[in-house]
């Protein structure tokens, strides 16, 4: 075949071949082609990837998954390819590869964009997504009802009777093992009221609005109460926006892009109405999603700029305490503490020094760093339910590192981490107490031993 050449005797590119292989791909509605091409496959991410460590397969590494995502975007790999689904769904989404990457590959965004193309293939999966992500997490009243039902189940004696009857072992679906993951809901059957506006104690330094969360508010109401109290003790007037919704993190991770955008718009409106100087979140998974509202809504003509301003005001609980000037507790708290870096706080938000800075200022506390504190615990949203085998292996590494730290308290500032690690410690026979940073600080303020 004769090759066309120009006057300098150089080959002339065929116009058809110069067209991007990703042109027209629905993935580019969520991310840019530049983001898709950023990875240079250097492999520096491999030693930081939990699933690659577990399987040793290139397809279960970040660069291997990016190769598959490119194939999906170009049409070379079909959406219903079972291997593609297996390897993408096996990813924890911990984003440790982002911290390790010298090229700044936005792996989390690439994974989410790809998962948005992988629609449910079975009726069971469609129903499960519809009931949970499409209904329960979209309607605060539904989440409140479910939370009340769970607290009644746990605190009325029903759970004890079900355990005695061994009913869960008879029913299909491994319900007996799944129930072991359930944390003990904080407080009584009725939730502790936080109020709408909580005044600052002493000099007012800032006006902040707090995202109370979904699972956090229903199962960890004590954590939210401690968060409010610690913020107030440090000069923050705290507002609880009444019309706030789920942050949309689970929707983003699993690929429900339209629902995540809807929730982002609702929360932007709810928090804008408070007139707060800062917007505060005490759950790292929620925080990572909230701080990416500008990415989620970057194509929205009405909300794009508002999302940028919203993100500019977002702070993690530990960030705001350091920023306004932390007032350390005066009473000593004799305890050996180790800190678990939640993935979406360490890798998603790049927040890691502030929590440690606060812990070190508690009189009497000894901070002991555990090995691989920034490795995933295996929770990863609903990953521990959908991928229990891999989640269990990843969790075993974490519980072993906690054991070797010989700590009395494990600080885990994310409800998913707290649930997963508490379960792992129970199964391993360890007695370390798992608590949120806010609870540790409030215990010190109250002078508890």
Image (tube, grey):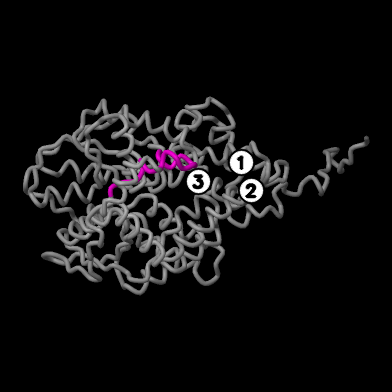
As displayed, is residue 115 above or below residue 52? below
Judge by depth and name the residue closer to the eye, 396 or 358.
Answer: 396
Q: Secondary structure at mark 2?
A: loop
Q: Is 388 left or right of 408, judged from the image as shown? A: right
Magenta stretch bounds: 168-184
Task: Tell me if residue 94 can be seen.
Answer: no
Closer-to-camera residue (165/440):
165
Which is more foreground, mark 1 or mark 3?
Answer: 1
Q: Which residue is mark 2?
A: 121
Label 1 or label 2, whichever comes before in sequence order: 1
* 222 shown above or below 169: below
> What residue is rendered at 46% in x and 53% in y?
250
- Along the polypeptide, which appears first: circle 3 or circle 2? 3
- Residue behind mark 3: 108
- In the image shown, does 122 or 107 lie closer to the viewer? 122
**Cα separation between marks 1 and 2:** 10 Å
Q: Is residue 226 magenta?
A: no
Gap between marks 3 and 2 measured at Cα: 23 Å
Quadrant where the C terminus sits is top left
User: Could you tell which of marks 1 and 3 lies nearer the N-terminus?
Assistant: 1
Label 1, residues with CA under 10 Å away: few <14, some 14-19, many ≥20: some
Which residue is located at x 54 percent, y 49 percent? Answer: 112
* Mark linked to residue 85: 1
């Amino acid at each position: 075949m004769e090759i066309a050449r120009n006057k300098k005797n150089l080959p002339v590119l065929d116009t058809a071949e110069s067209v991007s292989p990703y042109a027209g791909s629905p993935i580019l509605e969520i991310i840019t082609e530049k983001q898709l091409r950023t990875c240079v496959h250097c492999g520096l991410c491999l030693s930081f990837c939990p699933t690659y460590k577990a399987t040793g397969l290139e397809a279960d590494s970040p660069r291997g998954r990016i190769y598959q995502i490119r194939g999906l975007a170009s049409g070379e790999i079909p959406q219903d390819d079972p291997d593609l689904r297996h390897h993408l769904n096996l990813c924890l989404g911990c984003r440790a590869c982002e911290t390790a990457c010298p090229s700044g590959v936005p792996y989390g965004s690439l994974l989410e964009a790809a998962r948005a193309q992988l629609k449910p293939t079975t009726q069971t999966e469609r129903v499960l997504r519809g009931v949970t992500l499409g209904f329960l997490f979209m309607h605060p009243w539904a989440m409140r009802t479910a939370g009340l039902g769970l607290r009644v189940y746990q605190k009325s004696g029903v759970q004890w009777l079900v355990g005695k009857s061994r009913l869960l072992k008879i029913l299909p679906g491994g319900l007996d093992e799944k129930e072991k993951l359930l944390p003990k809901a904080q407080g009584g059957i009725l939730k502790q009221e936080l109020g709408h506006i909580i005044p600052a104690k002493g000099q007012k330094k800032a006006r902040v609005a707090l995202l109370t969360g979904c699972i956090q508010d229903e199962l960890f109401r004590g954590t939210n109460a401690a968060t409010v109290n610690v913020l107030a003790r440090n000069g923050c007037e705290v507002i609880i926006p009444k019309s706030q919704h789920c942050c949309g993190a689970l929707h983003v991770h699993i690929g429900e892009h339209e629902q995540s955008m809807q929730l982002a718009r609702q929360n932007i409106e709810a928090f804008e109405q408070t007139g707060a100087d800062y917007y505060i979140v005490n759950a790292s998974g929620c925080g990572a999603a909230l701080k990416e509202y500008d990415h989620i809504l970057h194509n929205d003509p009405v909300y794009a700029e508002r999302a940028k301003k919203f993100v500019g005001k977002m702070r993690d609980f530990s960030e705001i305490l350091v920023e306004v000037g932390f007032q350390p507790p005066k009473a000593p708290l004799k305890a050996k503490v180790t800190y678990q870096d939640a993935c979406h706080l360490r890798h998603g938000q790049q927040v890691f020094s502030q929590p440690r800075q606060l812990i070190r200022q508690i009189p009497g506390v000894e901070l002991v760093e555990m090995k691989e504190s920034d490795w995933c615990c295996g929770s990863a949203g609903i990953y521990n339910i959908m991928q229990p085998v891999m989640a269990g292996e990843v969790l075993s590494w974490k519980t072993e590192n906690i054991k070797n730290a010989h700590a009395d308290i494990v600080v885990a500032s994310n409800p998913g981490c707290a649930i997963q690690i508490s379960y792992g410690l129970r199964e391993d026979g360890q007695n370390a107490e798992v608590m949120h940073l806010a609870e540790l600080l409030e215990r010190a303020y109250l002078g508890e031993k």
